Image (tube, rainbow, N blue to C red):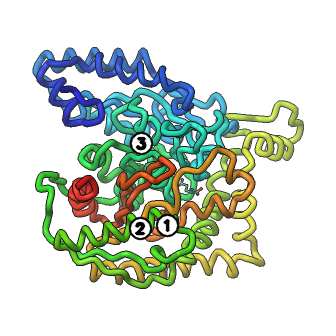
Amino acid sequence: MLNLRSLESIGEAVRAGEVTVREVVRRYLKAIESGQSLNAFVEVYEEEALARADAIDADIAQGGWKPLYGAVLGNKDVIVVKDHKVSAASKILEGFESLFSATAIRKLEEAGAIVIGRLNCDEFAMGSSNENSVYGPVHNAIDPERVPGGSSGGSAVAVQAGMCTAALGSDTGGSVRQPASYCGVVGLKPSYGRVSRYGLIAYASSFDQIGVFANNVADAARILSCISGPDEYDATALNEDLPEITITDPKPESRRIACFSEVLNGEALDPEIREATLAMIEKLKAEGHAVEVVEFPYIRYVVPAYYILTTAEASSNLARYDGVHFGYRAGEAETIEEVYTLSRSQGFGKEVKRRILLGTFVLSSGYYDAYYTRAQKMRKLLVDKTNEILDSYDFIISPSTPGTAFKIGDKTDDPVAMYLNDIYTVHANLTGLPAISLPFGTHSNGMPFGLQVTGRYKGEKELLEFSASLESTIKD
Ligand code: GLN
């Protein structure tokens, strides 16, 4: 039977002629329509998706086949698609259309996927709740009074609510893994450089990575295989291909796994999530893996280091939105200075302004060494210390988030409480390592939470093959 939550199932059904790609698209369009109040999609490419489906159906009828035929993908509003609007959920990019497609989008289309629309997110991917959007908040489909997480909240909900087979997001500090955890879906952040950032609107360039939301690890792996690879348009893209990932044997060889004691014993962690993590450690041991709780005292520095470095990079990246080059310009501006100040004051939202100010501050001459340089040193230390752990262990596991999805409005007045949501996820971005959030359990409050697995740099193959086995361990 056709399962719209599995690429393999869709592919098989389409190939066997049991269903047309047009029908698959139509079903997702229906789900998008009935889930409109969740506010996940800000634009649906209905006509275009159906036309593309017809072309694919015609090709299949001629015996043609491509790896992503039947796959229907949602795309976060920070990844550009040729001749389509893109706004980073910001007023400052109002009306802006892209002249080219991101490399990830081009590759998806070449592999036969259909991009069905543009997904809501936090403005310039800055946020952990999807409340910082010019389009208004996204609602978690399990409890619409709660946030979906952020910044890729629309992508998480689109997959959670069955509006597409998978979705692209971006992950600078957890924006794929944290919403995946809050919505009960799989969220993958590849190693830095695994996927080209060409066509991804920059937030903090040395952290940003395009990631994938899917219903299962196999789908995430398949999409990653299609979008990864070298790219002459992005000098930071890895100059090598992703090794082939084979998800067959559900119980792989015995692995060595670390879990940080500071995470398990940290006061931020919800007691039920802690219990679930401890139980998981025992289960993994029973399966023959060596799991050890190790000390990693640097955890307390990850959020401060992340918010100093990313705001510094953001203040520089966002300088280009000046009322001249792209999008919004304040109508009443008369002098050149007013064009800049009024366009930026009116065009950017509160959180983006907060970060530009913070970033400008940490880079300013009297404070540069006290903040920016120290945070850079901390980043280097984190990379070294984490790699030391990964010399002895294959993976690091932790909860993806300290708690479950909170109520809309609960943390909007407390930026620090909001930033602490990212305590377990920013580590992988500071170090450039691949990490994934897997649906792990359901809290007594009814909301899901995720298990994060971090692998070695460029170790997506091992990470995804192990994660696929974990999916069945979690279900057992
Ligand atoms: N929540 C984090 C932040 O606000 C992560 C954002 C992201 O990964 N894009 O910076």
Q: Residues within 10 Å of mark 2 (few under 14, many from 20)?
A: few
Q: CA gap, disc 3 to disc 1? A: 32 Å
Q: Which residue is mark 1?
A: 271
Which is more toward the observer, 22 or 158? Answer: 158
Q: Position of residue 441 (x, y in %)?
A: 38, 54
- Mark 3 or mark 2: whose residue is earlier in sequence: 3
Q: Dot 3: what SS? A: strand
What residue lies at 56% left-to-right and 31% top-to-bottom? 39
Q: Which residue is mark 2?
A: 275
Q: Which residue is mark 3?
A: 168
Q: In which quadrant of the rendered image does the N terminus lie?
A: top left
Work out whether 194 lies above or below 303: above
Q: Are marks 1 and 2 in contact (CB under 8 Å)?
A: yes
Which is more toward the observer, 257 or 238? Answer: 257
Q: Dot 1: what SS? A: helix
Work out whether 264 lies above or below 209: below
Q: Amino acid at mark 1?
A: Pro
Work out whether 463 lies above or below 293: above
Q: Residues within 10 Å of mark 1 (few under 14, many from 20)?
A: some
State whether label 1 is within 8 Å of ligand 1.
no
Q: Amino acid at mark 3?
A: Leu
Q: Position of residue 357 (x, y in %)?
A: 75, 60
Q: Dot 2: what SS? A: helix
Q: CA gap, disc 3 to disc 2? A: 31 Å
Q: Position of residue 21 (x, y in %)?
A: 26, 20
Q: Amino acid at mark 2?
A: Glu
Label 3 vs label 1, nearer the camera: 1
